[in-house]
Image (cartoon, grey):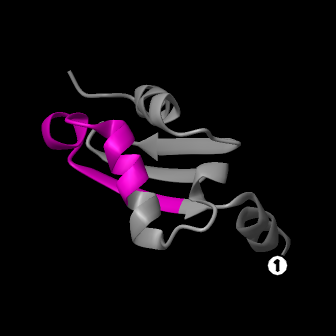
Amino acid sequence: MLPTPEQIEEYIKQGIQCTYLKVEGDGQHFFATIVSPDFEGKRLIQRHQLVYAAMGERMKEEVHALSIKAFTQAEFLQNSTS
């Protein structure tokens, strides 16, 4: 059975503290926008690694592709007002 966007959100929330999280997708390809204090001081690759760690083996077994937009709170506010 293919995972739902809501299930992907739950997987991410289990490993990352999120102040905003939205996942969209069709069961194989997902798009996640994540705002987290866990991303403070981390480079983009480190942020993605945190998300992949939260997803665990599901990235190999259940999810074909996950596109990630990972922001700190300040970055998210800046992007939403520009």
Q: Which residue is at the far left?
A: 61
**Callout 1: helix, strand or loop?**
loop
Q: What range of the chain is rendered magenta?
A: 49-69
| Nearer to us in this view, 48 or 42 | 42
Residue 48: in magenta span:
no
The quarter of the rendered structure image containing the N terminus is top left
Classify 10 Å Cα crowding around label 1: few (below 14), some (14-19), many (20 and above): few
Q: Report x, y in % for residue 56.
A: 27, 37
* Amino acid type of the residue tagged 1 in the rendering: Ser
Q: Which residue is at the far right?
A: 81
Residue 51: in magenta span:
yes
Quarter of the figure with residue 45: bottom left
Relative to 49, residue 79 above or below: below
Quarter of the figure with residue 20: top right
Query: Which residue: 20% across, 34% down?
Result: 62
**Is residue 80 visible to the viewer in this orientation of the structure?**
yes
Q: Which residue is disc 1 drawn over?
A: 82
Q: Report x, y in % for residue 29.
A: 30, 49
**Is residue 36 visible to the viewer in this orientation of the structure?**
no
Left or right: residue 50 compared with residue 40: left
Q: Which residue is at the far bottom?
A: 82
Query: Which residue: 59% across, 51% down?
Result: 38
Query: Which residue: 58% across, 43% down?
Result: 22
> How many numbered dots are placed on residues in this image?
1
| Nearer to us in this view, 28 or 61 | 61
